[in-house]
Image (spheres, helix red, strand yellow):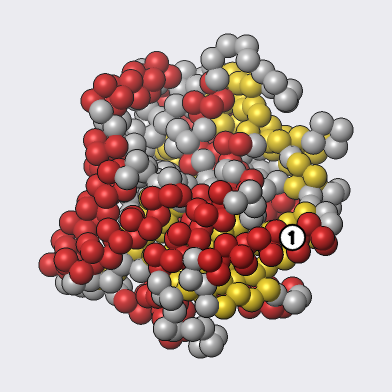
Amino acid sequence: MIDAKHLKHFSSIVGDDNIYSDKAHLIAYSYDATREHFEPDAVIFPRNEEDISAILKYCNEHKIIIVPRGAGSGFTGGALPSSGGIVLAMEKHMNKILEIDMKNMVAIVQPGVINMDLQRAVEEVGLFYPPDPASQEYSTLGGNVSENAGGMRAAKYGITKDYVMATRAVLPNGDIIKAGKRTIKDVAGYNISGILIASEGTLAVLSEITLRLIPKPKLTKTAMGIFPTVHDAMEAVYKTMASGITPVAMEFLDNLTIRAVEQTFNKGLPVDAGALLVTDVDGNLEEDLQFQLAQIEKVFFENGCSEFKIAKDAKEAADIWFARRNASPALSVYGSKKLNEDVTVPRSALPELLEKFYAIADKYQINIPCFGHTGDGNVHTNVMVDGSDPEQVKIAYQAIEEVFQATVDLGGTLSGEHGIGLAKAPYMSMAFTDEEMNLFKSIKKAFDPNNILNPAKMGLN
């Protein structure tokens, strides 16, 4: 338990109505999407950057742990207070869009702004913020930056890091820094802003983010291809991208996922299909969209596609996307415990990767349904077991270790968008050498010598 004198000092900084140590708040801020549970000692809602600075300076002097938190929507425990301490919650006050700069196509936001709120705000003036994590309706931009979130549009538009131009941040000792500029080019000094992206709140606390915007495309069309095997579908993915066409999204569902969605929602999906590919294209001319879809259709049929459907209108597009958007919850038909990973490989390795995953499933006699963002090589791999059976849970973790090893062997990475946090920390040695891990630890120590900021994450302890 944190000493009462510390709580009194924090109250003097933020006011009594912005610090809580009652049981209800401690429980509310002890969870994220992993469903793991770690109670903090207190929850503080900073009102501004100066509050953050004063809090961190005091915590650094008294060796009090601080864990920054956005919406708590992460899948790897990156914002969980696993070592106790204080949760620094941004959603109450630090949630404003400070500026939308039309001339330079830039937005300046506080870290607690909801992703979708920014998307809607900039689209009202004809601009576009592409990163669209599945949690976009509630995840915060500070959390998106801290985890380097991706999304379905990453195939064409990239991920969060591709839009961060600058950050303001508070170091563990209370110092305030500005990293980056709102200029298109900036090669002066080390890329500190780049280091803070995907650092999961272990190096500094973000207080302001400058994001690049682009013009919003006027037109979008959706299509779906049905394939007899997942291997055929994966071949079609990388060959489409190599053909010169870059779809906005290229998403897939394997047979197990198709069956789960159909069993749960009864949408008339082809349950005998090996895989579905769902794709979006966009642009400003109808002729351009028709050309893109014609090229995609050609590549799909060259790689075994049995049926290609183009949505006639927004309703048909929504119907096509329904299966993909509801894939994750539907998988509960295969078990009460899901180990949901987001491994990523070069696109050309996708066919072999999926073959390896299904071989692992056969080996352990479990279900491993897969779906995800194949346009950028990012596969959501779901090991499904009975969570009430300890032996099944043990098998699940053995299978996940093999999933990670197969991914790394094919030149891939442990995470394409969810981050490392607590959940993947034990597997970091698979993907990084001792020398690389020591470099990460040196960077952490340079920023946070007293290790007060979100310790025990990313395998750094």
Task: Name the quadrant containing residue 256.
Answer: bottom left
The quadrant in which the C terminus is found is top left
Residue toward you, 349 or 386: 349
Picture quadrant where residue 223 is located = bottom right
Q: Quick one: which residue is furthest to the left in this view?
A: 391
Nearer to us in this view, 106 or 349: 349
Residue 27 or residue 158, whichever sits in front: 158
Residue closer to the observer: 349 or 159 = 349
Residue at numbered disc 1: 291
Q: Quadrant of residue 221?
A: bottom right
Q: Residues within 10 Å of mark 1 (few under 14, many from 20)?
A: few
**Position in image of residue 287 (x %, y %):** 82, 60
Residue kind at label 1, given as amino acid type: Phe
Q: Is residue 129 left or right of residue 407?
A: right
The reply to whether residue 249 is visible in this rendering is yes
Is the N terminus in the top left, top right, bottom left or bottom right quadrant? top left
Name the residue at 18% across, 56% down.
398
